[in-house]
Image: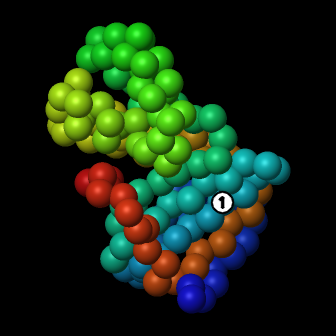
């Protein structure tokens, strides 16, 4: 069970300051940010941001791949239709497993989404944060460098 070791208002401490403090203390855990109905989670290991996600409609992997010209829009529609028959299946994994994308393409798109989550949260000027120590991300193999 994670222990909450740090919490406060984003009106007083911005995300960049919080991440710098976690880096300096070489902390491991999950930083949760809340602003109204919006949530963001940034997982930190040994002071380094490793993974980020949000509950709001953020930039999507498919959008990135289509925009880069690495994937036709029809491929996303097709995979979304297949995903309905396999709840919980990850679209990226399905695309890689069916040789539509390479691991490198998927990894880069995933990292772009994670960076977008963090950069968007850095603009939050209100809301709350809390950091739980020792909480780790599980089941994610693509992590921020």
Q: Where is residue 71 in the image (x, y as percent from the top left)?
A: 31, 16
Q: Which residue is depicted at the point 32% across and 36% down? A: 94
Q: Residue furthest right?
A: 36
Does 23 sit above or below residue 126? below
Query: Residue 43 at what x, y percent from top left?
Result: 46, 65
Q: In this view, does 130 lie above or below 127?
A: below
Q: What element carries label 1?
A: strand
Q: In this view, does 128 lie to the left or right of 48?
A: right
Q: Please say if 144 is above or below 104.
A: below
In the rendered image, residue 128, in percent from the top left (x then y), is placed at 74, 63
Q: Indicate whether 115 appears above or below 95.
A: below
Tell me, yes or no, if residue 83 can be seen here.
yes
Q: Can residue 105 be seen in this view?
A: no
* Colouring scheme applied when the structure was drawn: rainbow
Q: Residue at x 36, y 58 (%)?
A: 140
Observer-nearest of 118 and 98: 98
Residue at figure coordinates x 58%, y 79% from the top left: 132
Q: Which residue is drawn at 63% across and 35% down?
A: 57
Q: Residues within 10 Å of mark 1 (few under 14, many from 20)?
A: many
Residue placed under numbered mark 1 in the picture? 33
**Number of numbered tags placed on the structure image:** 1
Quadrant containing the N terminus is: bottom right
Q: Quadrant of residue 139?
A: bottom left
143 or 72: which is nearer to us? 72
Which residue is nearer to you in this view: 120 or 84? 84
Task: Quadrant for residue 108, please give it.
Answer: top left
């Amino acid at each position: 069970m994670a222990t909450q070791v740090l919490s406060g208002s984003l009106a007083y401490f911005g995300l960049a300051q919080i991440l710098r403090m976690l880096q300096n203390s070489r902390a491991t855990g999950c930083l949760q940010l809340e602003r109204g109905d919006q949530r963001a989670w940034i997982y930190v290991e040994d002071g380094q941001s490793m993974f980020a996600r949000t509950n709001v409609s953020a930039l999507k992997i498919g959008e990135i791949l289509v925009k880069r010209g690495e994937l036709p829009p029809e491929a996303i529609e097709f995979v979304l239709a297949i995903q309905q028959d396999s709840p919980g299946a990850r679209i990226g994994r399905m695309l890689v497993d069916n040789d539509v994308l390479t691991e490198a393409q998927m990894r880069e798109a995933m990292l772009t989404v994670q960076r977008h989550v963090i950069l968007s949260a850095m603009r939050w000027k209100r809301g709350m944060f809390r950091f739980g120590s020792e909480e780790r991300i599980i089941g994610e193999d693509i992590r921020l460098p």
